[in-house]
Amino acid sequence: MKVAAAISYCLQYHRFNSRPNTLENYSFLLKKFDALFQNRELDSITTEEIIAFLVNITAGRKQNTKRSRYTMLSAFFNLIINTLQPKLHNPCLSPAAKNLFHKPITSHWTIFDKDTIDEAIFRTLNVRNRLMLELMARGGMRISEVLGLHPADIDGQKLLLHTPKSGRELELVFIPKKLSSRLLDYVREKRILSHQRIFPITYAGARKIVVKIGNMVGIKLRPHDLRRHAATYASRSGVPIEIVSKVILRHADLSTTQRYLGKVSDHEAIRWIENLHG
């Protein structure tokens, strides 16, 4: 079976069975694979060629991305094996490839307390920058979601996400009333049209803003720390984990949410037990 035919079959399968984001990721990867191997027979591709291909397209990327590309390519071969060509060998399954594209080592991030995050927000005098910080810290938004907001997406205390990371058609972000009012005031003051971005800056620019604000209060702060703070603070304040997961973080399952929440210290554990049963 030719590589081009196998790719066509795989993409057709994902059009009917997968979320748009999944299809988009496979399309990106397999387009590059097709450009290199389209006229080859699938069973002629070696492990060495697979490794060279993946190393080339993931150069300079994080281990998470490398692992993701490897997993998708392996799944592509498995799909063909399971449905069309059962005797085909998956060249991705060699020990060398598995070791090179291993799962990233889980790192433990710092969870900042409410006072620290509040200080960072209150000391931010630039209105635009403060709004961006609050949308992440109060609404649990990703930086990409904040940067993609338009005035038309504001519906009172709800923000509409039309192309969410989950692949759903629409997601809702819920924010405090005061934050919603200040966001609308900013839009009116700046005369931002309904189809224009509220925060027309790049991801790199937004990240620099967050890092600079963190330095101002003596912490190493990244955009995702603010989203993580929103979840952890809600959880530690007694909000049910189902609400944290489905409403604040908009995760598909609880296991993803649990990785966001910081470790509970012995002191906190005792305090919660006393609150419940003391």
Image (tube, helix red, strand yellow):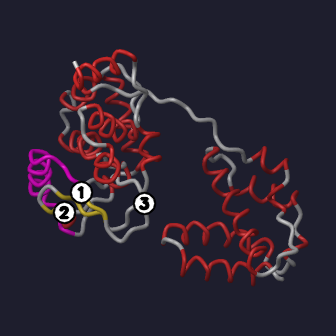
Amino acid under disc 2: Pro
- Give the x, y percent position of residue 106: 58, 35
- Give the x, y percent position of residue 143: 36, 48
Tell me which corner region of the image, top left, top right, bottom left or bottom right, holds residue 77. Answer: bottom right
Label 1: how many Cα within 10 Å (few below 14, some 14–19, many 20+): many
Residue at the spot of label 1: 198
6 over 129 or under it: above or below: below
Q: CA distance from mark 1 to mark 3?
A: 19 Å
Q: Element under label 3?
A: loop
Amino acid under disc 1: Ile
Tell me which segment is drawn in magenta.
Answer: 174-194
Q: Earlier in the sequence, mark 2 or mark 3?
A: 2
On the rendered image, what quadrant is the N terminus found in? bottom right
- Give the x, y percent position of residue 103: 66, 44
The residue lying furthest to the front in this view is: 277
Q: CA distance from mark 1 to mark 2?
A: 7 Å
Magenta stretch contains residue 177: yes
Task: State the residue at coordinates (35%, 19%).
Answer: 218
On the rendered image, what quadrant is the C terminus found in? top left
20 over 180 or under it: above or below: below
Tell me which corner region of the image, top left, top right, bottom left or bottom right, holds residue 161. Answer: bottom left
Residue at the spot of label 2: 151
Label 3: how many Cα within 10 Å (few below 14, some 14–19, many 20+): some
Q: Earlier in the sequence, mark 1 or mark 2?
A: 2
168 over 230 or under it: above or below: below
Q: Is residue 187 left or right of residue 173?
A: left
Amino acid under disc 3: Lys
Asked if the residue at tag 3 contacts the one at tag 2, i.e. Cβ–Cβ closer than 8 Å, the answer is no
Asked if the residue at tag 2 contacts the one at tag 1, i.e. Cβ–Cβ closer than 8 Å, the answer is yes
- Comparing 153 with 238, the one in front is 238
Numbered badge on residue 165: 3
Label 2: how many Cα within 10 Å (few below 14, some 14–19, many 20+): some
